[in-house]
Amino acid sequence: MHRKLERSFSIKVIIAGAGIAGLAAAQALEIKGHQCEVYEQCLGPRLGGAGIFLLGNATRALDQLGVLEPLEVNGRRIKEQCIFSSDGKLIHALSAEDFWSNCGPCLAMPRSRLIQALLSSLKRTRVNYGKAILAAHRTSAGMSAQLSDGSSVECDLVVAADGVNSWLRRATSGCRPRALGISCWRTVTDNTPNISAWTAMLGRGRTLLAIPVTASQVYLYADCRTSEVNRNTLQDFKEMFGDFRAPLGQLIAQLDTSAEIHFSGLEEVPDFSTFEDGLVFIGDAAHACSPSMAQGAGMALEDALVLAEVVSDASSTDVMRRRYLQHRQQRVAWVRQQARARDMLRGLSPIVRNFTLKHLGDTLYKRSYGALRSPLLDGGV
């Protein structure tokens, strides 16, 4: 039986994961007057990682969450996106500022700044570190979440925001992420070439990307086919991208053993995971995909806002499920589809790829991102 929700009272929500999705959901639900509690398996705030790039739909969501202003002050405004060939020839440039002007600014920053801003926004929500939510099930009174220390906590709704390797998704459906056959390196390094725009360079099966995140540093991202990675060593990494010229080649050359470089294989959650009765998946736990659309944070922030809206308006968990699907499923599927298309384009022969981007770059960008400028709650993409 679907649980009936009393509109005149706030509900109690337990959130698994204190990353971007979980903290944004807590803030969105808190704004709507609901009681939230977050459980995070790490022993403290997730302040590691490298950089993050937020396009206009993501900053629009942050504005609705009330956390955009401090990020605008401390983040780096990205006005232009440029693509070069690996030999340094400009292929395509686009004004991101103009394209996203009706949504919000395009910002880049260390990932830790976004986490800190979301944490600071919470006024009534408690974040419990060192405890993971391993399972959740329906009870006669609502929901029960089982914690990693053997205890349990009762609530009305459980939100799984515990990432691509979600314990809750595995426990409820057995669904595991699928490898995309792409491996990547992420780090933050000194901005010696004075990069001021989102700047990508494309080689044969290799991508190098740099985005300024502070006054003196850039977020550096590189990827290639997993099958081409022999050993994950700094020397091999530098050799794989050693033929990349300016403007980004020197960023690879300057890396040394003191650099904190994160290496991982890219994964995708194969199906859009949503409500079971009293349980909802958001962010990467629901729909992780390739980062080529730069929408991981954007989709998580949008999930949070839509979730808070439908939780506040729905009369039952079944209505909540249907409304959440109505507002999110098509939009998320679009991002996944476009991310796959962009990865396929990058994998074409350099001659075909560069010609396509040079002559159709504006059209392709508008096709990929135009739908994301539309409002969140219009029922479409």
Image (cartoon, grey):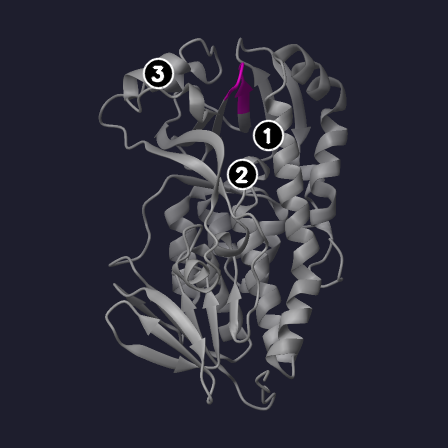
The residue under label 2 is which amino acid type? Ser
Discs 2, 1 touching: Cβ within 8 Å? yes
The residue mark sitting in front, 3 or 2, is 2
Give SS at disc 2: loop
The residue under label 3 is which amino acid type? Lys
Kindly identify which numbered label has been placed on residue 290: 2
Residue in the image at 54% along x and 11% along y: 88
Give SS at disc 1: helix
Judging by the rendered image, the residue that carries numbered circle 3 is 238
| Viewer can see residue 152 | yes
Discs 3, 2 touching: Cβ within 8 Å? no
The image position of residue 223, as x and y in percent, is 46, 26
Give the residues drawn in magenta, as a range.
200-206
The image position of residue 156, as x and y in percent, is 48, 81
Q: Quadrant of residue 375?
A: bottom right
**Looking at the image, is mark 3 or mark 1 earlier in the sequence?**
3
Kindly identify which numbered label has been placed on residue 343: 1
- 147 up-or-down from 52: above or below: below
**Looking at the image, is mark 2 or mark 1 earlier in the sequence?**
2
**Looking at the image, is mark 3 or mark 2 earlier in the sequence?**
3
Going by the image, does 299 lie left or right of 174?
right
Q: Real-space Cα distance between discs 2 and 1? A: 8 Å
